[in-house]
């Protein structure tokens, strides 16, 4: 009977739009520099630690750079028959200090990496619950989860160490080349020719690594989305005997991720292999040319040995530089995906509508001390009004509301009835500001809901969805979800009102019993009663009930109907109903059809003058759920 927004779990509004392709699936690979800028933005808060880690690593590398010269001095001393104890002590000190400084630098970089990842995760987890409802409905949750987990983990493994490798590798490579030039300019020219070739390899290959890595992470996101889809509807999958079909889909996603990962690994292997081959060729060329120069007497054996030691030190540095650049590309790809998630539109914390001039119809807006969410909210029932509201879920689709206008006075119960697709549930979505109307206004106590801060607006409203949501955790956690300061006495009272006190007494740990994933350990009726109790515990000024008793047996439905009727004496109750017993007890009834309010009145009045309502009533309103 209800009209629902376009979601996977509630899609019974005839005009609900189909889901769009998730943003993570249609994103094109980003250019190199935007990705590096995004990565730099993530690393910037930790620049102090990063610089300290890089400096320690660089100092350790510089001490390592001095070791070949110290070794040359040892050889020269031994060759000349002079004591070499001091040179040996110096060489040993350089080796030990260099290793300690390099290890300390690595530790500092790892600490900064953990801080970068923690900050990125905190920023994402702060934004994701605040995403606008339309954004959530058009984005795969599994892909968002992958960005918080997989992409941030990738960032942790690559970014700080890669930045250090790129900086340290560059500086040490330059310093090593200078030292080699001081030893022999001819051998240096041979070395530089090879190093230039390695640089060309880096320039050509690293963009491919970045793109391949981005494809890999997007594939992982797709696999996470598929797994979330299957596990989120596991009972339905099992009942339909569709395990094999869903498994095949997950396997296809895993295979796609494997192929994308293999492509990324292939480009990394190309980069590493070419670098290794070129450096081996460099060693052979230096050995050949150097041997000839030793034979000709141009240089001594100790000079050739020192030069080869520098070459041996240069090889891993060049490899480190190549790997660092490649890892930066991987980190940049992860940073771009994190930046995309952070760019998703979130709800505004404050009012988004500019103040209107006096006389715009808001004269009855409550004073700040009576605003929604204040400590007085449970004492003043709220009034609701729709003024020429026009709404469409997405451009190009038929409107769900066509200039809807009605008024719900403060207090009492108002029922909304009508066939499927009439726009009933959308009324609740607009009151809660899950969506914004395309035209017209939704008023709470005479003030446009867009002028209320969201937190204060929603604190005044209790909302029970048609498909009630129960979160993993304890029963107490679910009941106090929107009322963390509720006392045990208040909880016990709403348990009695929702007819949950008997069930709670049977639970092994009472209110501290785990309810399972999405309340899987509770029956449908129990989940519905938990949702009602949760809404009542907030003591709302406006209670929205979307077929809130549809899954209850006759006895519990009758008892809760009495509770709702009693609640309507202290607050405003707006209910989407399909049972005639609920509708007939309402103070007023709105009949909706095709996005319009076609009639309003009491049960007796509508039976006498509205044919659609009479037809709905004659079938107990059940056929039009």
Image (cartoon, helix red, strand yellow):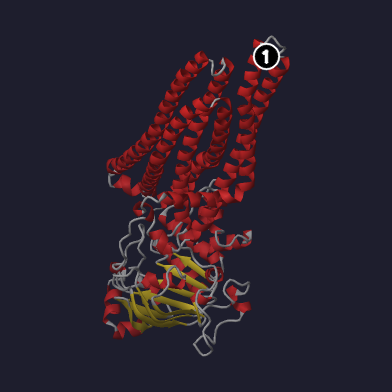
Q: Nearer the viewer, residue 257 or 430?
A: 257
Provide residue 552's location: percent of width, then percent of height.
40, 61
Report if residue 521 is visible in the image: no
Q: Residue at x 49, y 16 (%)?
A: 291
Instruction: Tell me where residue 337 appears, x and y as whole percent.
Output: 44, 51
317 relative to 374 in the view: left or right: left
Q: Quadrant of residue 134?
A: bottom left
Instruction: Give the quadrant of the N terminus.
Output: bottom left
Residue 56 drawn at (x, y percent): 64, 36
Q: Residue at x 28, y 44 (%)?
A: 242
| Residue in the foreground of this view, choosing between 185 and 40 | 185
Instruction: Please tell me how crowded label 1 is: few (under 14), some (14-19), or many (20+) other residues with Cα within 10 Å.
Output: some
Vertical comparison of 454 with 333: above or below? below
The residue positioned farthest toward the top in the image shown: 81
Residue 53 falls in which quadrant of the image? Answer: top right
Q: Position of residue 158 (x, y in %)?
A: 50, 40
> Height in image: 34 above or below 270?
below
> In this orientation, which residue lies closer to the viewer: 239 or 127?
127
Q: Helix, strand or loop at disc 1?
A: helix
Give the quadrant of the C terminus. bottom left
Instruction: Residue at 47%, 35% (x, y): give it.
Output: 323
Question: Which residue bears the numbered disc 1?
Answer: 77
Image point 49% across, 52% down: which residue? 38
Q: Nearer the viewer, residue 376 or 114?
A: 114
Q: How many marks?
A: 1
């Amino acid at each position: 009977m209800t009209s629902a927004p376009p979601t996977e779990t509630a899609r019974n509004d005839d005009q609900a739009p189909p889901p769009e392709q998730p943003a993570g699936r249609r994103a094109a690979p980003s250019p190199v520099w935007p990705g590096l800028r995004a990565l730099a933005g993530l690393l910037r808060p930790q620049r102090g630690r990063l610089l300290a880690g890089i400096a320690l690593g660089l100092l350790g590398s510089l001490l390592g750079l001095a070791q070949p010269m110290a070794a040359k001095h040892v050889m020269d001393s031994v060759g000349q028959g002079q004591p070499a104890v001091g040179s040996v002590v110096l060489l040993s000190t350089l080796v030990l200090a260099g290793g300690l400084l390099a290890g300390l630098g690595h530790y500092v970089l790892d600490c900064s990496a953990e801080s970068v990842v923690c900050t990125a995760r905190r920023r994402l987890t702060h934004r994701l619950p605040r995403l606008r409802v339309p954004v959530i409905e058009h984005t795969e949750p599994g892909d968002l989860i992958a960005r918080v987990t997989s992409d941030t983990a990738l960032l942790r493994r690559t970014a700080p160490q890669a930045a250090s490798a790129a900086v340290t590798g560059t500086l040490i490579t330059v310093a090593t080349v200078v030292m080699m030039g001081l030893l022999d300019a001819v051998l240096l020219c041979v070395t530089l020719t090879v190093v230039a070739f390695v640089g060309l390899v880096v320039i050509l290959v690293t963009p491919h690594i970045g793109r391949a890595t981005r494809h890999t992470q997007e594939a992982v996101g797709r696999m996470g989305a598929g797994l979330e889809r299957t596990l989120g509807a596991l009972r339905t999958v099992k009942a339909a005997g569709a395990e094999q079909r869903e498994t095949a889909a997950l396997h296809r996603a895993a295979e796609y991720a494997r192929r994308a990962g293999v492509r990324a690994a292939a480009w990394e292997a190309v980069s590493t292999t070419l670098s290794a081959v070129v450096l081996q060729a460099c060693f052979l060329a230096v050995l050949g040319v150097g041997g000839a120069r030793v034979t000709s007497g141009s240089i001594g054996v100790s000079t050739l040995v020192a030069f080869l030691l520098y070459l041996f030190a240069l090889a891993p540095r060049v490899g480190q530089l190549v790997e660092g650049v490649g890892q930066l590309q991987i980190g940049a790809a992860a940073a771009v995906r994190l930046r995309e998630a952070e760019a998703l539109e979130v709800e505004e914390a404050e009012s988004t509508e500019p103040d209107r001039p006096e006389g715009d119809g808001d004269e009855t807006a409550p004073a700040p001390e009576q605003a929604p969410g204040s400590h007085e909210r449970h004492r003043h029932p709220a009034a609701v009004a729709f003024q020429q509201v026009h709404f469409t879920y997405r451009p190009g689709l038929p409107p769900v509301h066509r200039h809807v206008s009605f008024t719900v006075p403060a207090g009492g119960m108002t029922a909304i009835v009508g066939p499927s697709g009439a726009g009933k549930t959308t009324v609740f979505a607009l009151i809660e500001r899950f969506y914004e109307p395309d035209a017209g206004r939704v008023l709470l106590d005479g003030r446009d809901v867009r002028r209320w801060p969201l937190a204060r607006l929603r604190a005044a409203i209790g909302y029970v969805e048609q498909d009630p949501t129960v979160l993993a955790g304890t029963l107490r956690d679910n009941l106090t979800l929107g009322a963390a300061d509720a006392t045990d006495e208040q909880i016990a009272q709403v348990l009695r009102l929702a007819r949950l006190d008997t069930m709670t007494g049977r639970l092994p740990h009472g209110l501290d019993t785990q309810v399972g994933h999405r309340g899987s350990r509770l029956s449908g009726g129990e989940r519905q009663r938990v949702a009602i109790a949760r809404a009542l515990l907030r003591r709302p000024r406006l209670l929205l009930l979307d077929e809130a008793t549809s899954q209850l047996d006759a006895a519990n439905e009758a008892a809760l109907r009495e509770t709702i009727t009693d609640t309507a004496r202290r607050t405003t109750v707006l209910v989407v109903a399909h049972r005639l017993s609920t509708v007939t007890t309402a103070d007023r009834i709105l009949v909706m059809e095709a996005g319009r309010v076609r009639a309003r009145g009491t049960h007796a009045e509508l039976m006498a003058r509205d044919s659609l309502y009479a037809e709905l009533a004659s079938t107990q309103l059940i056929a039009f759920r």
